[in-house]
Image: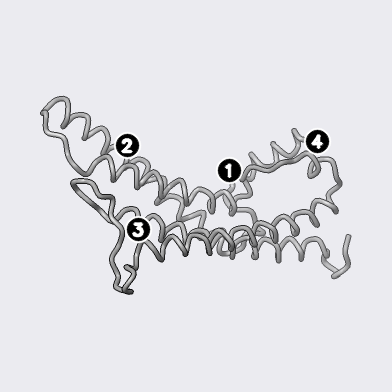
Amino acid sequence: MAAEHQTETEMRADRGPIPEAGLLGKFVDRLGLIFAAGIVLAMLILIQEVVLRYVFNAPTIWAHETTVFLCAVAFVFGGLYCTARDSHIRVVLIYDSVGPAVRRRLNVVISIVCAIASAFFAWATWLLVERSIFRPDGTVHFETSGSAWDPAYPAYLKLFLLAVLSVMAVQFIVLAVNYGRAARGPSGDTN
């Protein structure tokens, strides 16, 4: 039964987001290309830095922080991307041992629990964002890295994490609603 689930998941991964993810899932899936390009850009920046440092003895002050930021943003977005594609890590001990009707109901419950968890994490992230963007007197000042270059990447990353977790909570709600519709069946009766 586990082999069937793996084959099903692998086939879906090649086709994009699952239908239950709705329009939001399609949008998230398409947006994934931008973050994939960010990883390639990070690699190119690192290659340039190696050449500048070891061939020309002229390192930059921005390459390391920029590549860390690009990779961190891609990693954070990856959670939302996996949610839309239903390719996240799942403990399947119970899930794979039940029939399709129970699985459909479990999908609803799992999606609701994940929506609640994502919303709580978004709230906790807001507390971090608040401290990284607003000074105690209420003026806006983005937290910086403190390096020689000193970009505001820490604040930007926290803002991005807040946005992704908020959208992830909405995506799980969309999934719960659509899984719930599927569990009820075409006539409105539960299977």
* Quadrant the N terminus occupies: top right
The amino acid on which the numbered mark 3 sits, given as a three-letter code, is Ala
The amino acid on which the numbered mark 2 sits, given as a three-letter code, is Met
Label disc, if present, on residue 14 of the rendered structure? 1
Residue at the spot x=37%, y=42% of the render? 39
- Of marks 2 and 4, which one's residue comes earlier in the chain? 4
**According to the image, label 4 marks what residue?**
1
Q: Secondary structure at mark 3?
A: helix
- Of marks 2 and 1, which one's residue comes earlier in the chain? 1
* Quadrant the C terminus occupies: bottom right
Whether residue 74 is visible to the viewer of this picture, yes or no, is: yes
Residue 146 placed where, x, y %?
Answer: 25, 49
Marks 1 and 4 sit apart, C-alpha to C-alpha, by 21 Å
Q: Secondary structure at mark 1?
A: helix
- Of marks 3 and 1, which one's residue comes earlier in the chain? 1
- Of marks 3 and 4, which one's residue comes earlier in the chain? 4
Whether residue 163 is visible to the viewer of this picture, yes or no, is: no
The amino acid on which the numbered mark 1 sits, given as a three-letter code, is Asp
Label disc, if present, on residue 43 of the rendered structure? 2
Residue at the spot x=74%, y=33% of the render? 3
Residue 71 placed where, x, y %?
Answer: 39, 43
Residue at the spot x=46%, y=57% of the render? 161
